[in-house]
Amino acid sequence: MKLRNPGPVQPAPALQGPAGELAEAISRWPGVAAFTHWELGSPGVVDGAEFHIGDPELGHIHLDGTAHIPFGSAISALLVQDKMGRTPSWGRDWITYPVRSSKDVQHAAWLFGLAYARMHGTSDEDVRDRITERAKVAE
């Protein structure tokens, strides 16, 4: 997703708890800019923090702590198959992951890290290998 403007462009709100820990970590990555994520269909209603590298969106975290990360349908399907994320009801190109605990922060940071690597030129084949290796470790 590209940087949209359904509300004014402004800094990301401070998220609370584990979602806040995750947002702070992602915001420190080189080249990442954080903005307010606006509620879809309700311009001006704050719904979380979104992260961009230039114009493309790295992903976002809603106020309820749910992370949404774009991967494209093939990588998303592999993540869902290996139980590393869920398919949102509105599309197969993204995965969703609830961030409720420190363990969730670690996994969500790994997911955002995969998306970050892809945006910096890591091939889908390498991303698939990273997912397969992590799935083996989790067994």
Image (cartoon, rainbow, N blue to C red):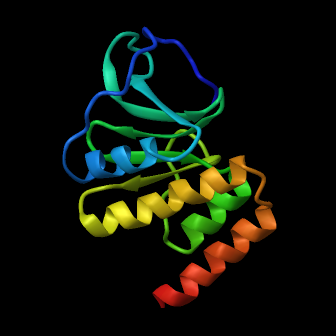
Observer-nearest residue: 10 or 67?
Answer: 10
Left or right: 86, with 42 as reference point: right
Total labels: the figure holds 0
Residue at the (68%, 60%) spot, across then down = 75
Up/down of 13 relative to 91, above or below = above
Q: From the viewer's perspective, tell me whether residue 26 is left or right of residue 116.
A: left
Q: Nearer the viewer, residue 15 or 92?
A: 15
Q: Would you place residue 79 above or below residue 34 in this image?
A: below
User: Could you tell me which residue is drawn at 55 percent across and 75 percent down?
Assistant: 82
Residue 53 quadrant? top right
* Relative image position of residue 127 (x, y in whole percent): 70, 66
What's the residue at 58%, 71% (across, down)? 81
In the image, residue 99 above or below residue 61? below
Q: Position of residue 121 (x, y in %)?
A: 78, 52
Quarter of the picture containing the N terminus is top right
Residue most extreme to the left? 17
Q: Residue at x 28, y 36 (%)?
A: 63
Residue 25 rendering spot, x and y as whole percentages: 39, 50
30, above or below 57, in the image? below
49 and 34: which is toward the camera: 34
Q: Residue 37 occupies which quadrant of the picture?
A: top left
- Point out residue 80 in the picture as x, y percentages from the top left corner: 55, 65
